[in-house]
Image: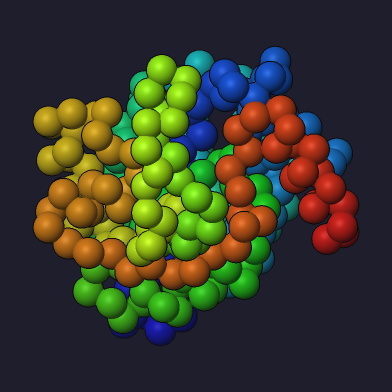
Protein backbone atom coordinates (compact mmCIF):
# COMPACT_ATOMS: atom_id res chain seq x y z
CA UNK A 1 0.00 0.00 0.00
CA UNK A 2 1.15 3.55 -0.79
CA UNK A 3 2.70 4.96 2.43
CA UNK A 4 0.89 8.26 1.77
CA UNK A 5 -2.50 6.57 1.97
CA UNK A 6 -4.28 5.79 5.26
CA UNK A 7 -3.41 2.41 6.75
CA UNK A 8 -6.02 -0.25 7.48
CA UNK A 9 -6.30 -1.85 10.93
CA UNK A 10 -8.66 -4.43 12.40
CA UNK A 11 -10.00 -4.50 15.95
CA UNK A 12 -11.72 -7.67 17.15
CA UNK A 13 -13.51 -7.48 20.53
CA UNK A 14 -12.94 -10.96 21.90
CA UNK A 15 -13.87 -10.70 25.59
CA UNK A 16 -17.43 -12.03 25.52
CA UNK A 17 -18.56 -15.17 27.32
CA UNK A 18 -21.13 -16.33 24.75
CA UNK A 19 -23.78 -17.28 27.31
CA UNK A 20 -26.40 -18.11 24.64
CA UNK A 21 -24.23 -20.47 22.62
CA UNK A 22 -24.63 -23.51 24.85
CA UNK A 23 -20.86 -24.12 24.93
CA UNK A 24 -18.61 -24.43 27.96
CA UNK A 25 -15.89 -22.23 26.43
CA UNK A 26 -16.53 -18.65 25.33
CA UNK A 27 -18.08 -19.19 21.90
CA UNK A 28 -15.24 -17.47 20.02
CA UNK A 29 -12.93 -20.23 21.28
CA UNK A 30 -15.31 -23.17 20.81
CA UNK A 31 -14.37 -25.83 18.28
CA UNK A 32 -15.86 -25.44 14.82
CA UNK A 33 -14.89 -27.76 11.96
CA UNK A 34 -11.76 -28.82 13.81
CA UNK A 35 -10.46 -25.37 14.79
CA UNK A 36 -11.38 -22.70 17.35
CA UNK A 37 -13.90 -20.27 15.88
CA UNK A 38 -11.58 -17.27 16.22
CA UNK A 39 -8.91 -19.13 14.22
CA UNK A 40 -11.25 -19.28 11.21
CA UNK A 41 -11.83 -15.54 11.48
CA UNK A 42 -8.13 -14.73 11.75
CA UNK A 43 -7.22 -17.00 8.84
CA UNK A 44 -9.39 -14.93 6.51
CA UNK A 45 -8.14 -11.58 7.84
CA UNK A 46 -4.52 -12.62 7.38
CA UNK A 47 -5.24 -13.37 3.73
CA UNK A 48 -6.22 -9.72 3.07
CA UNK A 49 -2.90 -8.12 2.12
CA UNK A 50 -4.04 -4.52 2.63
CA UNK A 51 -4.56 -5.04 6.38
CA UNK A 52 -1.62 -3.65 8.34
CA UNK A 53 -2.49 -4.88 11.83
CA UNK A 54 -5.04 -6.92 13.76
CA UNK A 55 -5.74 -6.13 17.42
CA UNK A 56 -7.47 -8.79 19.51
CA UNK A 57 -9.04 -7.38 22.66
CA UNK A 58 -9.51 -10.18 25.20
CA UNK A 59 -10.60 -10.40 28.82
CA UNK A 60 -7.92 -9.60 31.44
CA UNK A 61 -8.40 -13.17 32.73
CA UNK A 62 -8.24 -14.86 29.31
CA UNK A 63 -6.28 -18.14 29.36
CA UNK A 64 -7.09 -19.44 25.86
CA UNK A 65 -5.82 -17.01 23.25
CA UNK A 66 -2.10 -17.74 23.61
CA UNK A 67 -2.48 -21.43 22.87
CA UNK A 68 -4.86 -20.75 19.98
CA UNK A 69 -2.48 -18.32 18.29
CA UNK A 70 0.44 -20.67 18.75
CA UNK A 71 -1.24 -23.82 17.50
CA UNK A 72 -4.00 -22.75 15.10
CA UNK A 73 -2.97 -19.45 13.47
CA UNK A 74 -0.10 -18.75 11.05
CA UNK A 75 0.77 -15.08 11.52
CA UNK A 76 4.00 -15.05 9.51
CA UNK A 77 4.04 -11.24 9.17
CA UNK A 78 3.42 -10.53 12.86
CA UNK A 79 0.23 -8.58 12.23
CA UNK A 80 -1.66 -9.82 15.30
CA UNK A 81 -1.37 -8.16 18.70
CA UNK A 82 -3.31 -9.14 21.82
CA UNK A 83 -4.31 -6.76 24.59
CA UNK A 84 -5.88 -7.98 27.83
CA UNK A 85 -8.15 -4.97 28.31
CA UNK A 86 -11.56 -6.30 27.33
CA UNK A 87 -14.39 -4.45 29.07
CA UNK A 88 -17.87 -5.36 30.26
CA UNK A 89 -19.38 -4.17 26.98
CA UNK A 90 -18.43 -4.45 23.33
CA UNK A 91 -17.98 -0.68 23.06
CA UNK A 92 -15.50 -0.63 25.95
CA UNK A 93 -13.46 -3.42 24.37
CA UNK A 94 -13.46 -1.77 20.95
CA UNK A 95 -12.38 1.56 22.44
CA UNK A 96 -9.51 -0.18 24.25
CA UNK A 97 -8.40 -1.66 20.93
CA UNK A 98 -8.57 1.70 19.16
CA UNK A 99 -6.57 3.37 21.90
CA UNK A 100 -3.95 0.63 21.54
CA UNK A 101 -3.70 1.43 17.83
CA UNK A 102 -3.11 5.09 18.69
CA UNK A 103 -0.38 4.17 21.17
CA UNK A 104 1.27 2.02 18.49
CA UNK A 105 1.42 5.01 16.16
CA UNK A 106 -1.68 4.66 13.97
CA UNK A 107 -2.65 7.98 12.37
CA UNK A 108 -5.94 9.71 13.06
CA UNK A 109 -6.98 9.31 9.41
CA UNK A 110 -6.20 5.59 9.34
CA UNK A 111 -9.09 3.21 8.89
CA UNK A 112 -10.27 1.00 11.75
CA UNK A 113 -12.39 -2.00 10.84
CA UNK A 114 -14.21 -3.63 13.75
CA UNK A 115 -15.31 -7.23 13.35
CA UNK A 116 -17.22 -9.69 15.51
CA UNK A 117 -15.07 -12.62 16.61
CA UNK A 118 -18.16 -14.80 16.16
CA UNK A 119 -18.59 -13.93 12.46
CA UNK A 120 -16.16 -16.61 11.39
CA UNK A 121 -17.74 -17.04 7.94
CA UNK A 122 -16.50 -13.67 6.70
CA UNK A 123 -14.67 -13.83 3.36
CA UNK A 124 -11.78 -11.86 1.93
CA UNK A 125 -14.09 -10.87 -0.93
CA UNK A 126 -16.54 -9.17 1.45
CA UNK A 127 -13.73 -7.41 3.32
CA UNK A 128 -12.17 -6.12 0.11
CA UNK A 129 -15.58 -4.97 -1.13
CA UNK A 130 -16.12 -2.98 2.08
CA UNK A 131 -12.64 -1.44 1.92
CA UNK A 132 -12.90 -0.44 -1.75
CA UNK A 133 -16.38 1.04 -1.21
CA UNK A 134 -15.43 3.08 1.87
CA UNK A 135 -11.76 3.96 1.36
CA UNK A 136 -12.39 7.38 -0.19
CA UNK A 137 -15.56 8.13 1.76
CA UNK A 138 -15.53 10.88 4.38
CA UNK A 139 -17.48 8.79 6.93
CA UNK A 140 -17.06 5.07 6.26
CA UNK A 141 -19.62 2.31 6.37
CA UNK A 142 -20.61 -1.24 7.21
CA UNK A 143 -21.68 -4.50 5.70
CA UNK A 144 -25.42 -5.04 6.01
CA UNK A 145 -28.33 -6.91 4.45
CA UNK A 146 -31.75 -5.60 3.39
CA UNK A 147 -34.47 -7.14 5.55
CA UNK A 148 -36.22 -9.91 3.60
CA UNK A 149 -38.66 -11.23 6.21
CA UNK A 150 -41.77 -9.61 7.61
CA UNK A 151 -41.01 -7.81 10.87
CA UNK A 152 -43.24 -8.18 13.93
CA UNK A 153 -43.19 -6.18 17.14
CA UNK A 154 -43.91 -8.27 20.24
CA UNK A 155 -45.75 -7.52 23.45
CA UNK A 156 -46.30 -10.21 26.08
CA UNK A 157 -45.43 -13.03 23.72
CA UNK A 158 -47.95 -11.92 21.09
CA UNK A 159 -47.75 -9.80 17.96
CA UNK A 160 -48.38 -6.16 18.76
CA UNK A 161 -48.08 -4.94 15.17
CA UNK A 162 -46.29 -5.48 11.87
CA UNK A 163 -43.38 -3.18 11.03
CA UNK A 164 -42.82 -2.18 7.38
CA UNK A 165 -39.55 -3.73 6.16
CA UNK A 166 -38.92 -1.20 3.40
CA UNK A 167 -35.55 0.61 3.76
CA UNK A 168 -34.58 -1.54 6.75
CA UNK A 169 -31.24 -3.32 6.90
CA UNK A 170 -29.61 -5.85 9.23
CA UNK A 171 -26.20 -4.64 10.34
CA UNK A 172 -23.22 -6.96 10.02
CA UNK A 173 -19.48 -6.55 10.49
CA UNK A 174 -16.83 -5.49 9.63
CA UNK A 175 -17.71 -1.84 10.14
CA UNK A 176 -15.14 0.63 8.82
CA UNK A 177 -14.51 4.16 10.13
CA UNK A 178 -11.67 6.64 10.57
CA UNK A 179 -9.72 5.92 13.74
CA UNK A 180 -10.00 9.35 15.36
CA UNK A 181 -13.66 9.70 14.40
CA UNK A 182 -14.56 6.34 15.91
CA UNK A 183 -12.63 7.02 19.12
CA UNK A 184 -14.51 10.31 19.48
CA UNK A 185 -17.88 8.68 18.77
CA UNK A 186 -17.41 5.79 21.20
CA UNK A 187 -15.96 7.97 23.96
CA UNK A 188 -18.84 10.41 23.66
CA UNK A 189 -21.49 7.67 23.62
CA UNK A 190 -19.93 5.79 26.54
CA UNK A 191 -19.95 8.95 28.63
CA UNK A 192 -23.74 9.00 28.26
CA UNK A 193 -24.79 5.34 28.17
CA UNK A 194 -23.05 2.14 27.10
CA UNK A 195 -26.38 0.40 26.49
CA UNK A 196 -27.25 2.62 23.51
CA UNK A 197 -24.17 1.52 21.53
CA UNK A 198 -25.13 -1.70 19.80
CA UNK A 199 -22.45 -1.38 17.12
CA UNK A 200 -19.85 1.11 15.87
CA UNK A 201 -22.24 2.58 13.33
CA UNK A 202 -24.69 3.58 16.07
CA UNK A 203 -21.89 5.54 17.76
CA UNK A 204 -20.98 7.26 14.49
CA UNK A 205 -24.67 8.04 13.88
CA UNK A 206 -24.80 9.78 17.27
CA UNK A 207 -22.41 12.38 15.80
CA UNK A 208 -25.01 13.19 13.15
CA UNK A 209 -23.17 11.24 10.42
CA UNK A 210 -24.59 8.71 7.95
CA UNK A 211 -22.45 5.62 7.26
CA UNK A 212 -22.56 3.85 3.92
CA UNK A 213 -24.46 0.58 3.66
CA UNK A 214 -22.48 -2.04 1.73
CA UNK A 215 -24.43 -5.19 0.87
CA UNK A 216 -23.08 -8.22 2.71
CA UNK A 217 -24.16 -11.86 2.52
CA UNK A 218 -26.51 -13.99 4.56
CA UNK A 219 -23.66 -16.45 5.17
CA UNK A 220 -21.80 -13.77 7.15
CA UNK A 221 -23.88 -14.70 10.16
CA UNK A 222 -23.01 -14.12 13.78
CA UNK A 223 -22.75 -17.42 15.66
CA UNK A 224 -25.03 -16.96 18.66
CA UNK A 225 -27.24 -19.98 19.29
CA UNK A 226 -26.45 -23.74 19.30
CA UNK A 227 -28.09 -24.27 15.91
CA UNK A 228 -25.83 -21.61 14.39
CA UNK A 229 -22.83 -23.87 15.01
CA UNK A 230 -24.36 -26.61 12.86
CA UNK A 231 -24.97 -24.19 9.99
CA UNK A 232 -21.49 -22.66 10.23
CA UNK A 233 -19.83 -26.06 10.35
CA UNK A 234 -21.65 -27.14 7.21
CA UNK A 235 -20.62 -23.98 5.35
CA UNK A 236 -16.96 -24.29 6.43
CA UNK A 237 -16.83 -27.93 5.33
CA UNK A 238 -18.38 -27.01 1.99
CA UNK A 239 -15.78 -24.27 1.45
CA UNK A 240 -12.92 -26.59 2.28
Q: Nearer the viewer, residue 4 or 218?
A: 218
Looking at the picture, how far across and down is residue 169, in whole percent? 42, 58
Determine the residue positioned at 83% across, 60% down. Answer: 239
Determine the residue positioned at 62% across, 57% down. Answer: 218
Describe residue 139's horizontal placement relative to residue 83 as left or right: left
Give the image quarter of residue 7: bottom left
Q: Which of 186 and 227 is in front in this view?
A: 227
Q: In this view, does 221 lie above or below 87?
A: below
Q: Is residue 80 visible?
A: yes
Q: Is residue 47 above or below residue 10?
A: below
Looking at the picture, how far across and down is residue 44, in whole percent? 66, 59
Number of on-image labels: 0
Looking at the picture, how far across and down is residue 129, in whole percent? 52, 75
Q: Which of 65 and 93 is in front in this view?
A: 93
Determine the residue positioned at 84% across, 48% down. Answer: 234
Describe residue 208's horizontal placement relative to residue 142 as left or right: left
The quarter of the image holding the C terminus is bottom right
Describe residue 199's horizontal placement relative to residue 209 as left or right: right
The scheme the figure's colours follow is: rainbow
Q: Is residue 122 above or below residue 215?
A: above
Looking at the picture, how far across and down is residue 103, in whole percent? 28, 47
Describe residue 122's horizontal placement relative to residue 151 as left or right: right
Q: Is residue 70 visible?
A: no
Determine the residue positioned at 13% across, 53% down. Answer: 207
Amino acid sequence: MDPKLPSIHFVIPCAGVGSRSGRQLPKQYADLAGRPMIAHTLKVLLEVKSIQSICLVVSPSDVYIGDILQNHVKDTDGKISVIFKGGNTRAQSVLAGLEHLQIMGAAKEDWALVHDAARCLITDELINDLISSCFKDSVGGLLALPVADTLKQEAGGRVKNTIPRENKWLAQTPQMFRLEMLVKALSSSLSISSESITDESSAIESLGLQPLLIKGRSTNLKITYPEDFEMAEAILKLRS
